[in-house]
Image (tube, grey):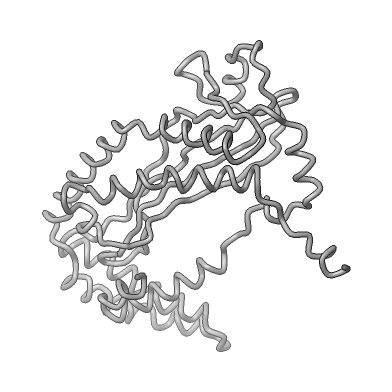
Amino acid sequence: MIYLNCLKQAPLVLTAWLVVALVMAGCAQTPAIYTMQPEALEAIRSEISTIGVYISPELPETEVMLPAKGVWGGLKRGIVVGASLPIMIGFASPLPGGTVLGVLIAPLGAVIGGIYGIFTAVPAEEVEHAEVVLVIAAEQIKQRKLRDAFIKRVIDLGNTQTELTFVEWQAASASVDTHNQALLSYPQKEKIDALLNIQVQKVGLHGIYTIDPPTDTFVQIHVELIRLKDDTILLDEHFTCASDEERTYQDWADQGGSDVIHEFRDCVPELTEKIIDDFFMVYPINWNDDFQN
């Protein structure tokens, strides 16, 4: 689907997308939990039996890749894309001096990109209308109480798929914004060994900086498993849920932004299953032992 969307764009945009995608793919990191020694992970899991589940009330950062607005916006963005494209190609090229050659060609690329941007930019009124629609959709998402649904699903999955006990962590005050404050506020009579602290860090629409970029919805969360007796972070990972299909900003705003609402709703089961699997069920493979045997 990514390639089908890209083929609808002009060759300039297609090339920029492919080059940047290759660079980003090369920067991907393996989650630390997959590189741990199995014995170390087993030791962590064996010392806990009851886990409190908590989601920080702190509002996430919003990142939205907007299309260029109107002729002026298209000109400016086209210049940036056109100038940077030959430099990126030169950097990725195995040819000696590719980056230098890209710098020399950049001014011509800026001119071509600017002209391209003028003729392909989305009318400003269309972008502004889509912004209003998606802001309303965002408010509808907040009203669906996805936070409560997330906590409930983590607890249900944890209790049914593992031998551990999961309960909701009840902070004493809604103003709690750090796990240290949350620890102090919880009734000591509850025998909870560890806190599963979840924070929604970023939400929005991801895309490459082009004139009218295809984007996907995304939710990025940060999860920590904290041992309560000494406030030690046992496991610490980031998870991201993204839509399978990319669309333009205007397409996401169609039908009142209903597809955006559905995508964020669907992230709840996907992320909760990933948390339970990675933190409490999956074991990394000890390759050295396998080869020795």
> Does 106 appear above or below 202?
below
> Does 189 appear above or below 251?
above
What residue is at 59 percent from the left and 15 percent from the top?
A: 186
**Whole-percent x, y for residue 231 in the image:** 70, 27
What residue is at 37 percent from the left and 56 percent from the top?
A: 243
Q: Quadrant of the C terminus?
A: bottom right
Q: Nearer the viewer, residue 18 or 3?
A: 3
Q: Is residue 284 left or right of residue 160?
A: right
**Whole-percent x, y for residue 135 in the image:** 23, 41
Q: Is residue 164 left or right of residue 56?
A: right
Q: Nearer the viewer, residue 204 or 94?
A: 204
What residue is at 71 percent from the left and 37 percent from the top?
A: 234
> Does 173 appear above or below 139?
above
Q: Nearer the viewer, residue 211 or 59?
A: 59
**Extreme residue in the right direction:** 292
Q: Is residue 44 left or right of residue 269?
A: right
**Whole-percent x, y for residue 191 in the image:** 68, 18
Q: Quadrant of the N terminus?
A: bottom left
Q: Is residue 232 left or right of residue 5?
A: right
Give the quadrant of residue 250.
bottom left
**Extreme residue in the front direction:** 160
What residue is at 57 percent from the left and 32 percent from the top?
A: 197
**Extreme residue in the bottom direction:** 95
Q: Nearer the viewer, residue 192 or 10?
A: 192
